[in-house]
């Protein structure tokens, strides 16, 4: 439990959140969150899920051990995956080590894909279009980003993206916080 408590506190500080702000995001009391961070209170899985959602990380983030640091990611270890109800294909490009705050990913967008949801969350997003064209809508403004061009914006602004062409687009993305 101490490792989980330390990770919660560390991640909250990395995101420059006060206990009050985390309390507002999770619906958990400030005193409870403080006790959890100090290791003075046990944590139900439902409460940990609320905290993970507030940080935009998977719940497994709090249980991962980085004792075996892995800085190098071989091509053979890069496995594309999809998130449920998404047509995007992601490939994690990051190493594994304690305190990692960047999430480099390769994103493949199928032809004609438009996200149905508008997102906003803490952090930053940087995307470099490797192939194709992607239209990024950030805070109501459309940016047509072509191969060889990039876009970088704060993730707290409402945003979504689409592939307007009849062939896939490939994008290198680097985001914070770590999400996969």
Image (tube, grey):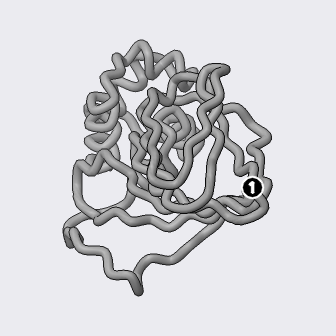
Q: Nearer the viewer, residue 25 or 174?
A: 174
Q: Position of residue 113 (x, y in %)?
A: 77, 53
Residue pictured at 44% horizontal, 16% vertical: 21
Residue pictured at 60% horizontal, 70% vertical: 81
Q: Decide: is 34 above or below 135.
A: above
Q: Name the residue tied to disc 1.
A: 165
Residue pictured at 31% horizontal, 23% vertical: 16
In this rendering, does residue 18 appear at all?
Answer: yes
Other-residue count near label 1 (Cα within 10 Å), few / some / many at <14 / 14–19 / ≥20 = some
Residue pictured at 45% horizontal, 65% vertical: 92
Q: Nearer the viewer, residue 163 or 123?
A: 163
- Please identify the quarter of the rendering in which residue 115 is found: top right
Left or right: where 148 falls relative to 96: right
Q: Nearer the viewer, residue 4 or 16?
A: 16
- Please identify the quarter of the rendering in which residue 125 is found: top left
In this rendering, does residue 180 appear at all?
Answer: no
Left or right: where 68 falls relative to 102: left
Q: Decide: is 155 above or below 133.
A: above
Q: Nearer the viewer, residue 82 or 16?
A: 82
Left or right: where 58 falls relative to 112: left
Q: Position of residue 126 (x, y in %)?
A: 42, 42
Left or right: where 71 falls relative to 11: left
Q: Decide: is 12 above or below 2.
A: above
- Please identify the quarter of the rendering in which residue 86 is found: bottom right
Q: Position of residue 22 (x, y in %)?
A: 44, 22
């Amino acid at each position: 439990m101490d490792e989980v408590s330390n990770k919660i506190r560390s991640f909250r500080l990395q995101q420059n959140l006060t206990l009050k702000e985390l309390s507002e995001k999770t619906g958990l009391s400030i005193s409870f969150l403080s006790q959890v961070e100090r290791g003075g209170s046990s944590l139900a899985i439902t409460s940990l899920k609320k905290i993970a959602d507030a940080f935009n990380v998977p719940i497994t983030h709090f249980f991962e051990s980085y004792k075996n640091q892995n800085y190098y990611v071989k091509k053979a270890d890069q496995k594309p995956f999809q998130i449920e109800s998404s047509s995007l294909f992601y490939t994690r490009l990051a190493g594994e080590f304690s305190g990692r705050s960047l999430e480099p990913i390769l994103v493949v967008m199928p032809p004609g894909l438009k996200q149905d949801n508008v997102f906003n969350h803490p952090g930053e997003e940087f995307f470099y279009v490797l192939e194709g064209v992607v239209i990024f809508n950030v805070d109501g403004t459309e940016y047509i980003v072509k191969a060889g061009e990039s876009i970088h914006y704060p993730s707290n602004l409402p945003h979504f993206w689409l592939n307007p062409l009849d062939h896939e687009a490939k994008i290198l993305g680097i985001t914070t916080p770590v999400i996969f």
